[in-house]
């Protein structure tokens, strides 16, 4: 029995060579030559005003909360179906999370429920482009504009995905990326803050550099650097940036491989899914997905759990996520209870993610598909 991993860290090009170069450059702390190359790559490919590498997407989200001046008592609107960091970054600043349910089709924040969630205390809306499929950005931005609320896109899954022809991450005043080992482009742990509102750019450098104006000092704009604001250490080592840049260089190869993986699962499983009441991802016509994951929605929790166990017995590793945030200990502490976000409660029981990584072979996929299509539903 050949094991099929859910995820596997991979090297795709010059990772080791560039890491050696970073050491030879004699700067392996943050903001060395490779960090600058990563910034330039993200800025030019996506067309964002400024990109700053961070130690994680979690930290990019934390930076966004600081940059928006989130204070105790403020409210931040977040989809209930997301990773804990989307909410925690704002709660750390004292915000109260306002969970909005998701669309049952894309599993993205349901923008039709936004107006009802807004109060005079709402400071930010944080849409998550789930599975790298864009949220309904026209409506979200229009509602945010009418109420003068900032939008921060959590684009952890969505690098190079598009909404109506425009890259995800270019819509909000800020957006956050993840380069965690499970993502399309990775350096183990890493992230980026993308800044579209130029008014936030200079302060972002300061917050990322421990609240100092060290970036201005390195550019020769001030003759010494000092403590000017709150902040923390959010910049990654240039060794990690070197690893990441090597992956960026292979953008076309990585994305076309992932597209093939996704298309093969889709082609092989769509008839089976229809016959067995299983739903596959829905990608609206005006969106290009980022090919981050392949998920399926089983009819219920019992069947989802059985399928995960059945696959594991055959050496195939699949996973589920996310537990509804409003029903976590923290969510309940904010006064939420069962029934507040019914779509998330249901989807969370049904979702399974299939093995998906940059070295997944078609033989691996055939093994997965063969096992799934032989799964007994009764
Ligand atoms: C939607 C979402 N946001 C944020 C994160 C946090 O990313 P990181 O691990 O880079 O901090 C994740 C992690 O997978 C995520 O799925």
Image: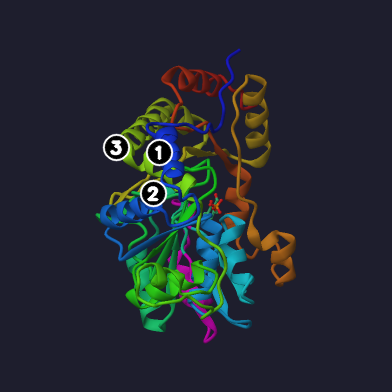
Which of discs 1 and 3 lies nearer the camera? The answer is 1
Do callouts 1 and 2 mark residues in contact (Cβ within 8 Å)? yes
- Asked if the residue at label 3 sits under 8 Å from ligand 1, the reply is no
Do callouts 1 and 3 mark residues in contact (Cβ within 8 Å)? no
Real-space Cα separation, disc 2 to disc 3, in angstroms: 20 Å
Judge left or right: residue 278 versus residue 15: right
Query: In x, y percent, where is residue 27?
Result: 46, 51
Crowd rating for badge 3 (residues with CA inside 10 Å; few <14, some 14–19, many 20+) = few
Query: In x, y percent, where is residue 57?
Result: 51, 56
| Residue 18 disc label | 1
Q: Which callout, 2 or 3, points at the residue further toward the start of the chain?
A: 2
Please name whichever residue, 172 or 44, is drawn nearer the observer in this view of the structure: 44
Query: Within the image, what quadrant is residue 93 found in?
Result: bottom right
Which of discs 2 and 3 lies nearer the camera? The answer is 2
Crowd rating for badge 1 (residues with CA inside 10 Å; few <14, some 14–19, many 20+) = many
The relative height of residue 375 versus residue 246 in the rendered view (above or below) is above
What residue lies at 41% left-to-right and 83% top-to-bottom? 147
Query: In x, y percent, where is residue 264?
Result: 38, 27
Real-space Cα separation, disc 1 to disc 3, in angstroms: 19 Å
Report the residue marked by disc 2.
Answer: 34
Real-space Cα separation, disc 1 to disc 2, in angstroms: 8 Å
Q: Secondary structure at mark 1?
A: helix
Report the residue marked by disc 3.
Answer: 252
What range is drawn magenta here? Answer: 103-126
């Amino acid at each position: 029995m050949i094991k099929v991993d859910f995820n596997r860290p991979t090297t795709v090009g010059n990772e080791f060579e560039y890491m050696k170069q970073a050491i030879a450059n004699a700067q392996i702390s943050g903001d060395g030559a490779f960090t600058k190359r990563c910034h330039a790559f993200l800025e030019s490919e996506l067309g964002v005003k400024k990109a700053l590498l961070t130690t994680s997407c979690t930290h990019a989200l934390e930076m966004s909360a600081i940059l928006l001046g989130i204070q105790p008592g403020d409210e931040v609107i977040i989809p209930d179906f997301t990773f804990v960091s989307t909410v925690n970054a704002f709660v750390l600043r004292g915000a109260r999370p306002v969970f909005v349910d998701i669309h049952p089709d894309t599993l993205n924040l349901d923008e039709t429920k936004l107006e009802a969630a807004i109060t005079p205390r709402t400071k930010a809306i944080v849409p998550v482009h789930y599975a790298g499929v864009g949220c309904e950005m026209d409506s979200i931005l229009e509602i945010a504009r009418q109420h003068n609320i900032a939008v921060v896109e959590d684009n952890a899954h969505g690098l190079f995905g598009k909404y109506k022809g425009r890259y995800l991450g270019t819509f909000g005043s800020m957006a956050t990326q993840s380069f965690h080992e499970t993502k399309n482009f990775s350096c183990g742990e890493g992230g980026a803050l993308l800044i579209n509102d130029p008014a936030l750019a200079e302060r972002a450098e300061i917050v990322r550099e421990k609240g100092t104006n060290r970036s201005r000092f390195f550019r020769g704009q001030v003759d010494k650097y000092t403590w000017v604001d709150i902040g923390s250490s959010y910049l990654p080592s240039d060794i990690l940036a070197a690893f990441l840049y090597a992956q960026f260089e292979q953008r076309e190869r990585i994305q076309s491989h992932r597209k093939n993986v996704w298309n093969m699962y889709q082609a092989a499983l769509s008839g089976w899914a229809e016959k067995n009441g299983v739903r596959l991802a829905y990608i609206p016509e005006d969106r290009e997905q980022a090919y981050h994951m392949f998920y399926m929605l089983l009819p219920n929790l019992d069947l989802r759990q059985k399928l995960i166990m059945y696959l594991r017995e055959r050496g195939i590793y699949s996973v589920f996520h996310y537990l509804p945030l409003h029903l976590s200990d923290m969510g309940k502490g904010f006064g939420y209870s069962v029934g507040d976000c019914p779509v998330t409660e249901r989807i969370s029981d049904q979702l399974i993610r299939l093995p998906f990584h940059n070295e997944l072979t078609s033989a691996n996929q055939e093994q997965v598909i063969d096992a799934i299509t032989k799964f007994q539903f009764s």
